[in-house]
Image (cartoon, coloured by chain):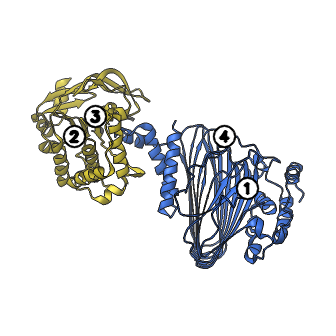
Amino acid sequence: MLEIKNLRASLEEEGKEILKGLNLTVEAGKVHAIMGPNGSGKSTLSYVLSGRDGYEVTEGAAELDGQDILEMEPEERAAAGLFLAFQYPVEIPGVGNMTFLRTAVNAQRKARGEAEMDAATFLKVVREKAKELKIDAEMLKRPVNMGFSGGEKKRNEILQMAMLEPKLCILDETDSGLDVDAMKLVADGVNAMRSPDRAFLVITHYQRLLDHIVPDVVHILANGRIIKTGGPELALEVEKNGYADLIEEAA
Amino acid sequence: MALPQAKLTATQERLAGLAMPEAAGWSALPRAAALARVQAMGLPGRRDEYWRFTNPGDLIAPDPHPSRHHPTQKTPVFHEMDRVRLVFVDGVFDAAASDDPVLAGVEITRLAEAQDQNIHWAADLYGTLEAHGHEPVERPLAALNTAFATDGVLIRATARAAKPVNLIYLNKSDCSDAILHHVIKVEPGADLTILENGPAAARFNKVMEVDIADGGTFHHVRSQGRDHDRRAVTHMFARLGRESVFKSFTLTVNGVLTRNECVIELMGDHGVAHVAGACLGDGPDFHHDDTVFITHDAEQCESRQVFKKVLKNGATGVFQGKILVQPGAQKTDGYQISQSLLLDEDSQFLVKPELEIYADDVACSHGSTCGAIDETALFYLRSRGVPRAEAVDLMVLSFLAEAIEEIEAEEIREEIVTRLSRWLSRHRG
Ligand SMILES: Nc1ncnc2c1ncn2[C@@H]1O[C@H](COP(=O)(O)OP(=O)(O)OP(=O)(O)O)[C@@H](O)[C@H]1O
Ligand SMILES: [Mg+2]
């Protein structure tokens, strides 16, 4: 599903290299977790994959279902099935949540040559999914993420993911800022979407999320590279011992 | 004081081409007085402080700049609304194209026909608010209008009007130089909505004087668009009585040179005056100027100015807005915001926000910002699959929302948003 080969990326302005030859393969139907110290490049990876400005890819490749995505516009990547749940979801004053969601759903459908979702169906589907995530109707009416609490923003990301039904879901610290119950809701939302033709890349600092969303593979990202790959037990090891040993071992 | 020679010459040259109507009736006096004002003030020039950001050249030249094309009006704005249409073609009332001017609680008379009729209220009002509006800043083009208006409409509302009156302007000839003067009186407790749209003429000078009595309500929604050659100066003079309400919104797109002045005086306690504008400019030929002057002369009044401009490809937007709080106008609540969204570095926004306060117990605020599209928000929208152009449109609409929300009628608000969206999709890139 996702194939990253020797990816090197720098900050466009400062020229500082953040991703330093990163290799990663995520198969369809699997959940991969990425853990790693602060500043190791986890969010940068998610931004480079989703096409944010400000990063320059100097080497390597990234393919989604065999398509080279690095040359695509962000909206094309989204239409191709990539979704990023932001570490810091963005507030957009004046743009209604519903308008935004509907525009996004239909833009993607249009880009894929599918029929648009009619207003009534859309409303019905949103309401159902919002209910599952305990997002109330009043919140849906507000401008995108405006006045949402940290946890509400994260749940709103999952709602967008549920509406857009992407192939590859990248979750960047979706668990941070969530209370225990909200984490369960989000995990349930993610688990409900697990399917043989969808993959997840879950970036997190904590084992706790991985109790709910059990990963197939765990990677450790440090200093712009994947330095170790293992099973769920690797997350437990990090939880217990931190990264120091792992980093030393890799050096 | 003698006028500078250049100003004197420009004024004389312009006046030479104008004539007052022969049978001006009761309007002869106010017209003569207005002419004397013009002669004393002289027409605006580039050196005038009040015209620092806008070159009045095309507005005062002896002849209008010809308009190159005459847009079709197949589906004009407001066309689906139930309203009384009054149509002016190149500045002349067209009865055949208009609806019967019949509306319960509202008297409607054409200026050109009213002058020899005994219409006291209009005779008292014509040119009065304009004459009053030169203090402390002169507005010579408004005085010129009072002196030489060829037509217009006199509207008196004595009750709640069941539907709006729509002033529709059409431009059919290349060199029309239209001067229209409307006089509106809203009697105590009456409620009137005026809609205005359409390209008026190659050059357009319009004055609307609105006198709102105690407890009266006046709404005004105007759309300036379609006429890509528009060169227009408009003045709205409003006087508000106790507990009266004035709300005006203008949408401006296209056009070459537009100066919309709005001069409001809150004379009775608890009056409310809102004036708002949304403007979209594309290209180096676009120049739009909103100039507002609100005077608080009574207690506990509220005024709001909300002006938003989206400019691209070298367009220019101007905002000059002032809140003047007179001694004794306690508990004034004055708000002014002027913002622009510049979609590129070639466009510019020139502002002069002013507050002048002579009362001690007031809450007044003003703010002005000039910014670019929020790239983070743009990326967020695109990452959800919304194409760049559509995402920019969404953000532009959201930027304009605060101004559009000033329109009270939902039906009109939606119409304006629809128009805006279409304009945006035609002007991508
Ligand atoms: N736009 C930017 N300008 C300057 N530095 C940046 C920028 N983006 C990323 N960096 C730097 O790149 C490095 C990697 O940042 P990144 O956000 O990818 O880390 P992370 O692994 O997601 O960390 P965290 O766990 O704290 O979220 C950091 O040192 C960060 O300061
Ligand atoms: Mg991060």
x 74%, y 44%: residue: B174
- Residue matched to label 4: B285
How far apart marks 1 and 2 lie (CA) works out to 69 Å
C-alpha span from label 1 to label 4: 24 Å
Marks 2,3: beta carbons within 8 A:
no
Q: Answer whether residue B127 is visible to the viewer in this image.
A: no
Tag 2 subunit: A
Colour given to chain A in the rendered image: yellow
Amino acid type, residue under disc 4 in the picture: Asp
How many marks overall? 4
Q: Secondary structure at mark 4?
A: loop
Q: Is residue B408 above or below residue A79?
A: below
Which disc, if any, is residue B91? 1
SS for callout 1: loop
- Tag 2's secondary structure? loop
Could one spot residue B380 in this view of the protein?
Answer: yes
Q: Are marks 2 and 3 on the same chain?
A: yes
Q: Amino acid at mark 2?
A: Thr
The answer to the question of whether label 3 and label 4 lie on touching residues, with beta carbons closer than 8 A, is: no
Which element carries disc 3, helix, strand or loop?
loop
Where is residue A61 shown, x and y percent of the image?
30, 22
Q: Amino acid at mark 3?
A: Gly
Q: Which residue is mark 3?
A: A81
